[in-house]
Image (cartoon, grey):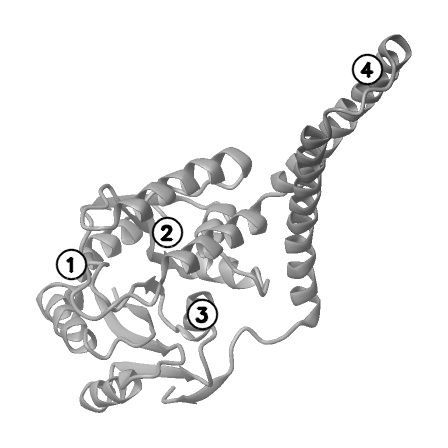
Amino acid sequence: MDKKKLTVVVPCKNEEEVLPEFYKRIRKVKDSSLDAKVYAGILFIDDGSTDQTLRVIKELAAADDSIHYISFSRNFGKEAAIYAGLSHADGDYVVIMDADLQDPPEMLPEMIDVLESGEADLVGSRRVTRKGEPAIRSLFARLFYKLMNKISETEVVDGARDFQMMNKKVVKAILSMGEYNRFSKGITGWIGYKKKWLEYENVQRAAGETSWSFWQLVFYALEGITAFSTVPLVISSVIGLTFCVLAFFAIIFIIVRTLIFGDPTSGWPSMACIIMLVSGVQLLGIGILGQYLAKTYLETKNRPKYLIDESNL
């Protein structure tokens, strides 16, 4: 039987320090076990790097004809890089993995075996520990997954990574979801199909610094919530209705008290606090609504998800 082809999609942003080690590790896996299973090629997506990432990729591509690359005209974000990689991948199987070696290349043969057996259409990876990660980031990550799975019908697996291998059927399904505001962890949960999750211990970056700050992760989490749940809108509506009911009964109470005891003027500090609280809740509701309207606005523009500056495809 003819061997199938695997395309390894690697989004990169400012990864010049780690790319040589990444290539060394994945080449070792290819030579030891992967080449016996599939024809493996690497597709680097340079997401507007400002260092020498593109130069390093070109040097690797010049020495290995199984390496291809796409370089964006600017930074469009990891989600755009993933979409571009899936759009241009020509393999029977496609795997997405980071260049920082937090996604162990040694897991690739096992992923291939699962897909070849027909046990799953998508093989994902999830970290069972967050050793070495800042405590505050780990805490917020766990809270996000718990919240997301409570307010959304789409399952998002706790500890899931973008390190996932899939067959053509799954790739086609993901690409059919052409929204501009993308959240891959939610998309892979929404499409269904048979999945299997491989667990592993957390791995530290091999070199360089992560391009994801704490606040970027927070905004990315908000992106996921608003992309796959309308519960925040429901919550803001319920809060608004609750305050209306409380205000109604408060008015009745004030009228009755005034008729019985007169019209005292004390209590203005507490009234000021109440006004500030209600105003804050109103602004929160407007802000939540604004997030959904902003996403609708961006979708209606129908702008491309990325622009290519150069490529060797």
Residue 151, given in percent of the width and then of the height, sits at 54, 36
Q: Secondary structure at mark 3?
A: loop
Give the amino acid type for the residue marked by disc 1 in the picture: Glu
**Gap between marks 1 and 4 measured at Cα:** 70 Å
User: Who comes first in sequence, dot 2 or dot 3?
Assistant: 3
N-term-proximal mark, 4 vs 3: 3
Residue at mark 4? 253
Kind of residue indicated by mark 3? Gly
- Residue 137 shown left or right of residue 87 in the figure: left
Q: Is residue 60 left or right of residue 166?
A: left
Residue beneath disc 2? 122
Residue at far right of view: 259
Query: Dividing the image into 4 quarters, which one contains the N terminus?
Result: bottom left
Identity of the residue drawn at 51% across and 57% down: 173
Mark 1 and mark 3 lie on one chain; the one further toward the N terminus is 3
Between marks 1 and 2, how big is the CA–CA gap?
A: 17 Å
Estimate the spatial distance between the alpha carbons at disc 2 and disc 3, rounded to whole Å. 23 Å
* Residue that appears at 68% across and 44% down: 285
Amino acid bearing label 4? Phe
Estimate how packed mark 3 is, as few (under 14), some (14 to 19) or many (20 or more) residues with alpha carbons within 10 Å.
Answer: some
Dot 4: what SS?
Answer: helix
Q: CA distance from mark 2 to mark 4?
A: 60 Å
- The label shown at residue 77 is 3
CA separation, marks 1 and 3? 27 Å
Dot 2 or dot 4, earlier in sequence: 2
